[in-house]
């Protein structure tokens, strides 16, 4: 298995574990609506105990629905731990998707510039 796929599976597994711990939910509590307890267990162990075992986007989508998290966020390495930050990330991506190509270029340039400047200081 290629390292990039193994890394993606470990990212998904880490995000599943982090989200469940953050919300204090057990595998049993998360199961339902297309996600069995065994599937949740497999998601949490993917890429670690069984690196050859994968999942489907449908399964990730069902798990995301159960956790109230957009599916794409399960694929992000270093997913913000705060649900507030994740909601801000979702707003940013929705704004980017809805923007015109020119607005997207402006957003990217602005964010890159802000990242170079560093965090804003509180008064």
Image (cartoon, rainbow, N blue to C red):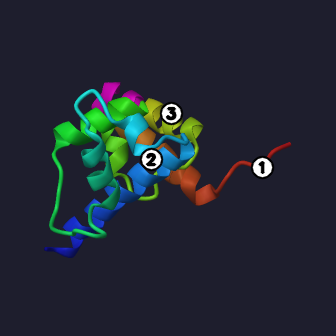
Task: Name the residue tied to disc 1.
Answer: 121
Q: Does residue 44 sit above or below 30 in this rendering?
A: below
Tell me what residue is drawn at x 31 percent, y 30 percent: 97
**For the magenta stretch, what is the residue range?**
93-101
Q: Mark 3 = which residue?
A: 87
* Percent of width and height locating residue 64: 34, 36
Mark 3, secondary structure of its residue: helix
Q: Which one is closest to the eye, mark 1 or mark 2? A: 1
Q: Which residue is mark 2?
A: 109
Q: Main secondary structure of the magenta part?
A: helix
Left/right of residue 52 with respect to residue 101 in the rendered view: left
In the image, residue 94 lies in the stretch drawn in magenta: yes
Badge 3 density bin: few <14, some 14–19, many ≥20, Cα 10 Å: some
Observer-side mark, 3 or 2, equals 3
| Rendered position, 112 above or below 48 | above
Q: For numbered disc 1, what is the local secondary structure?
A: loop
Q: Residues within 10 Å of mark 2 (few under 14, many from 20)?
A: few
Residue 3 position in % (x across, y down):
22, 75
The residue drawn where x is 57% and y is 59% is: 116
Q: Is residue 52 left or right of residue 88?
A: left
Report how far apart the C-alphas of labels 3 and 2 lie in the structure: 22 Å
Q: Quadrant of residue 33?
A: top left
Q: Earlier in the sequence, mark 1 or mark 2?
A: 2
For marks 1 and 2, give the CA distance: 21 Å
């Amino acid at each position: 298995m290629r390292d990039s796929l193994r890394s993606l599976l470990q990212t998904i597994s880490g995000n599943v574990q982090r989200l469940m711990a953050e919300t204090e939910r057990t595998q049993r509590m998360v199961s339902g609506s297309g996600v069995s307890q065994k599937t949740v267990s497999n998601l949490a162990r993917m890429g670690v105990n069984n690196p050859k075992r994968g999942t489907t986007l449908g399964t990730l989508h069902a798990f995301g629905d159960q956790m109230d998290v957009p599916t794409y966020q399960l694929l992000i390495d270093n997913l913000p731990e705060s649900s507030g930050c994740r909601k801000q990330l979702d707003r940013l991506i929705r704004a980017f998707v809805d923007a015109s190509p020119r607005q997207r270029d402006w957003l990217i340039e602005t964010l890159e510039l802000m990242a170079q400047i560093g965090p804003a200081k509180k008064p």
